[in-house]
Amino acid sequence: MSAKTEFDHEQLQTLLTLARQEDLGPNGDVTSMLLPETALTARGSWELVAREEGRFCGAQIIPMLLETLAPEVTLDWIMPDADRAALKPGQTIARFGGLVCQMLAAERTILNFLQHLSGIATLTSRYVAAVAGRHAKIYDTRKTTPGLRQIDKYAVRCGGGHNHRVGLYDAVLIKDNHLDGIPTDRLAHAVFEMLNRMEALPCAPAFVEVECDGLDQLAELLKVVGLDVILLDNFELDDLRSAVRMREEAGLRGKVELEASGGATLDRVAGIADTGVERIAVGAITHSAGFLDLAMDAA
């Protein structure tokens, strides 16, 4: 039921090119230009090292980072299965070699990407660990920094999480704003009418999901044929349990998944998973993840 999440390499290249322009501007690295000629043409080697415990993400984009930011620096070694790897402080993740002047200019931007992605992967992995052994899976949301969504979702996968829709274009999610003003007793009819217009869409949606704000709305949505997921917005734990029971009594287990959204903090997420929902949406794994501390040390 997850949306397609492979890299759009053209979009990624645009992002990396913008990152390069943002740092180097029209003049390049003016500080490194002050170094003697011997330093500018020297070659060096570096190690990417973890400064704290976490989950690494970024191996898949390192080749494009180097090609765009430091074309004469090579990736000489990277730890096996680096993406998703659990890191310990002091652990070497990768080794690089090449022109010193290029690494001086590229180091900060490379680290910005890798620390950002690893921070998301790390926070996601903590949520995933918190619900381990339960049926529920952790899903991301569209709460991402513009331009970074596809790599943020890649980082969520590296953390063991799952991707929700990529954008507005690939899946149907009928939210409360779409249904504003519709009485509860007309909700099923209104949604059914919307689904009847899906044939006019330019593509088949990856899934169809509808949001509800209470058990009365849920009761109406359970009457609608063609839903893949029902989003339970800011439900208390008792209401989540009731929602699962209502779905079972309607004979829709295995046909319609329930997604809890709102208030899924690390200390609450296990309790949410214990209610029996299949999906837990966590915006925090992308919008509130900090950088994982990584360093590029001279070797």
Image (spheres, rainbow, N blue to C red):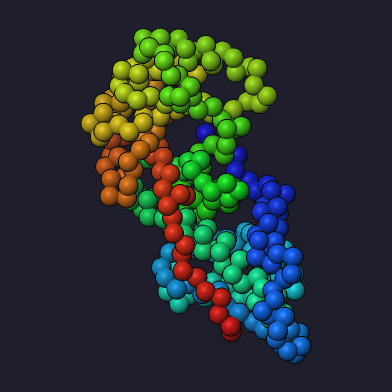
Q: Quick check: 23 left or right of 50?
A: right
Above or below residue 166? Residue 51 is: below
- Percent across and percent down for residue 110 are 61, 66
Q: Residue furthest left?
A: 238
Q: Nearer the viewer, residue 272 or 66?
A: 66
Residue plotted at (31% across, 23% down):
214
Q: Residue at x 30, y 21 (%)?
A: 215
Question: Which quadrant would residue 79 be assigned to in this image?
Answer: bottom right
Tell me if 155 is positioned left or right of 21 in this view.
left
Q: Is residue 56 left or right of residue 247?
A: right
Q: How many marks?
A: 0
**Residue 160: where, in percent of width, then height?**
46, 51
Residue 276 appears left or right of 19 = left
Q: Is residue 105 visible?
A: yes
Residue 80: x, y in percent?
56, 67
Q: Position of residue 189 (x, y in %)?
A: 45, 9
Which quadrant of the figure has residue 126?
bottom left
Instruction: Say which quarter of the image contains residue 279.
Output: top left
For image coordinates 38% across by 24% down, the residue present is 212
In this rendered view, identify the residue nearer to me: 223 or 232.
232
The residue sitting at 51% across, 46% down in the picture is 144
Q: Is residue 278 visible?
A: no
Which of the image's four quarters has the C terminus? Answer: bottom right
